[in-house]
Image (cartoon, helix red, strand yellow):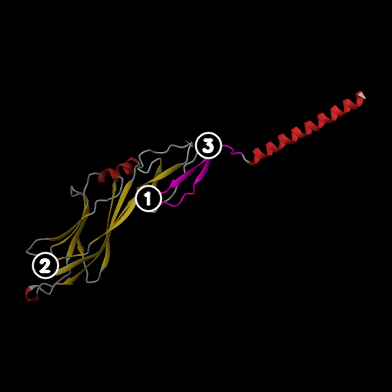
Amino acid sequence: MKLIKFLSLMLLSIIMIILFVSCVSENSDDNDKNPYKGKSYTVTFEANGGNAVEPKTIKENQALSESIIPTKDGYKFDGWFLNAELTTEASFPITITNDVTLYAKWLRVSDMISCKNVHLKCWNGYDDTATYYVTPAGFDLDRLNELGYTMKIIVTYQVYYEKDYDVPLGIGYAGAPEYNASLINSKNYGDVDEDMPTSTSASYRSLEWVLNISDLKNEQLRLIFNTDNIQNIVYFKNITVSYTCY
């Protein structure tokens, strides 16, 4: 009788051990299938005109370790910020404790503008001049200077002439007029093409100026065309100014 009781207790113990091990195993499987049983948060990326960046889901108190680098034509990515005003920069790795939006900051590194077409003819013995103010706009010159950038400015235009039939007695059509084109700063320093020839057919010309960003700060750039020819009318068309930082 005692033997039967002993065997019964042993069997009951074995059954209980099997049930316990099975329960622990199931719980272990659940944990393996669901490692993020705690809270998780969403990190949203506002690219501000750059290519779209997919949101990320991060477990509570885990860190977002790497900065995703988006792209935007004509701009350099200058970091993620914690506010839309772009005054508080995000420093990676970031520990995530709530849903958060990161905002991209961009530096403009290229641009192009167009200038109004013009025609020049000298009157009363003085040069006739067209002036365009072409100081680069929309560039964070302080930040670009800090990063060591240089700016290349290229002006392209078409130039040609036609005879001025209003000249008295129809005289003075001996030759094609010449003109000067200059891209200079407020101290009259820059690039000047002097006594450039023209023809009756439109031809493309260009000016190029490469300078340090620090030389641009607090400077006013002027694009100037002028002629002192009284015999003909000189036309400048399709004038563009391109800015490239590198």
C-alpha span from label 1 to label 2? 46 Å
Kindly indicate the quadrant of the structure image that contains residue 204: bottom left
x 33%, y 44%: residue: 144
The percent coordinates of residue 37 (x first, y second) are 59, 38
User: Magenta residues, as a range?
Assistant: 35-63
Residue 163 lies, with reference to residue 62, above or below; the image says below
x 93%, y 25%: residue: 1
Q: Is residue 54 magenta?
A: yes
Comparing marks 1 and 2, which lies closer to the viewer? 1
Residue 20, disc: none
Q: Looking at the image, which is closer to me, 199 or 97?
A: 97
Residue tagged by mark 1? 75
- Of the two numbered discs 3 and 1 on the same chain, state the one appearing first in sequence: 3
Residue 230, disc: 2
The percent coordinates of residue 172 (x first, y second) are 10, 72
Q: Looking at the image, which is closer to me, 184 or 67?
A: 67
Q: Is residue 149 left or right of residue 158?
A: right
Q: Looking at the image, which is closer to me, 120 or 75?
A: 75
Residue 3 lies, with reference to residue 110, above or below; the image says above
Give the residue type at disc 3: Glu
Residue tagged by mark 3? 60
- Of the two numbered discs 3 and 2 on the same chain, state the one appearing first in sequence: 3
Crowding at dot 3, Cα within 10 Å, few <14 / some 14-19 / many 20+, comes out as: some
Q: Residue furthest bottom?
A: 169
